Structures are given as C-alpha cells and as structure tokens.
Amino acid sequence: MKIKLLLICGLAAASLRAQAQSQDPPGIQNNPVMQRDYSKVGTNEYGSLNDITNGAPGLLTRSTKPGTLGSPYADGRWLTADVTLANKLPLKPIMMKYDVLAHRLVMYRPAPANDSIELDDHQVASFVLNEPASNAGPARKRLFRRFAEATTGSQHLDYVEVLHAGRYTLLKHYVKTIKRPSFQGMYSDGAPVDEIEDAPEYFLKAADGPLTPVKLTSKSLQAAAPPLAAALKTAISAQRPNSETGWASVLDATDPPVAAK
C-alpha cells in the first residue's frame, strides 16, 4: 500500500511540474538573465520581488487554445523590464511580458525553474520594457504606466504605453479580442481556429486638458493639438511617418519631450 501511495504521489508531482513548464519556444534558453537573490536585499534598498510573486495564483498556464492565431502580448518577446512599485521603490530588472488579453504581467524564471509565473501587480505603478537594437531600429526604452485617465474602471487597471511625453502625451492603449471561427456549412469562412485581433486605441492629452481619442494621421493630431498644428504639418511633410515610432518622432520634433523625474 505504501509503495502504491508513493507511486501515485510521484506521478501527481510530475504532472504538476509538466504543467508548470513555460509553453514558449526552446529559443528562450538563448536569452539568459542574471537574477538577483532578493532575499538578501534590504527593503530600504529595493522593492521586494516576493511581495508581487507570493500573491500569484499559480504558475502560468495558457489563456488561449493551442493553434490560436496572433499573440496575447503587447510584445511577444521576453524583454528585460524595470518595474516600479506604487511606493516608488524599484525592482531589480526581471524578464517580463505584458499579457494584454488576460490583463496580467508574467515573469520568466530562469534555470533551474525555466518557467513563467504570474505577478500580483496590484502594487505595480509602471514598468519599462528594454527593447534591444535590431534591424528595425536602435535600442529603446518603452514606458508603460497605469491608464489613470481611463473612463471605465476596468480600463483604469490596464497599462498604456507612453509613445511621447511633452506638453502633450501620446498614449497607446492595447486592446485585444478573440475572434471565434464561424461555420455556416459550405459557407464556412476558414479553418476552425480562434484568432486574436489587435484593436489598439490612441489618445492625446494636454497637461491640463482632457483625454482625446486620436488616429495616427495628420488631420487627427492637428485637431487634437491646435497649438502644434502648423509645426505638425511641417514635420509630417518632412518625415512622412508610417509607424508608431515615426509618429512619436514627429511629436518629439514639434513638442520637445519632458525629461522623466
């Protein structure tokens, strides 16, 4: 009886370990990160990582079905993140992703764990994703903060990426939804897979003004920021932006960024 009980316990433990393993591609092993031993760091020096991992409901599991098209993340890569808590204490850099679809932050734990864990982000005020240089452009720091200006409670808990911050702030609110396959006999619209659709929202806000929904077009931005209209027209004509970073560059040129405090 003891032998059978030990065997059952062993199989259960193996099953839990298998479920805990990250579902990310093996390539993640090529992105090691040095993790500091937070148990030896005084609370007056750095924020406590334990404070936002002890409250996690459990090891990360998939929130979408296998074969789902699209990504639930703001950025699908594991990027080094600088996290700041509500009490202004920073955490040492960790490898992290922002799961937009599930409204959560997940952290990668390197060997020997080699898994992902959901963070209890109630204490998180903001984080910076450090994007490395690539063929697409130079290295850059991407600031995400709470959507404090949101008009609904659920959005208020989300994060927005700050694309530009000067007299005006350009914000990107990530929105993702799952499109279910529809079948109507011979009129089926495709393969039976779910698809994650991106529907980001952009907002421009003056320091003392309302939150204005905008599109990344000349007409929309000029209407939302009348004092910058003439300068925007000139910069847009010169730069011909065709991406988020391009439009942010236009605003940087017409509305000098404010240094972070």
Image (tube, rainbow, N blue to C red):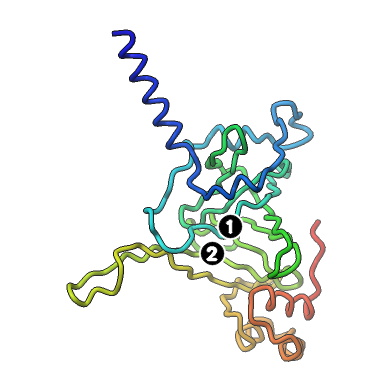
Q: CA distance from mark 1 to mark 2?
A: 8 Å
Q: Are marks 1 and 2 in contact (CB under 8 Å)?
A: yes
For this orientation, the residue located farthest to the top is 2
Can you give x and y, in whole percent of width and height, for residue 45 in the image?
A: 79, 34
Q: Quadrant of the N terminus?
A: top left
Can you give x and y, in whole percent of width and height, for residue 248 in the image?
A: 70, 74
Q: Quadrant of residue 7?
A: top left
Count of residue discs: 2
Q: Quadrant of residue 9?
A: top left
Can you give x and y, in whole percent of width and height, for residue 87 in the image?
A: 70, 42
For the point 64% across and 46% down, which residue is it?
95
Secondary element at image label 2:
loop
Judging by the rendered image, the residue that carries numbered circle 1 is: 159
- Is residue 57 among what the camera can see? no
Judging by the rendered image, the residue that carries numbered circle 2 is: 174
Dot 1: within a 10 Å radius of its alpha carbon, few (fewer than 14), some, or many (20 or more) residues? many
The residue nearer to you, when weighing 112 against 79, is: 112
Amino acid on which the number 1 mark rests in the picture: Tyr
Amino acid on which the number 2 mark rests in the picture: Tyr
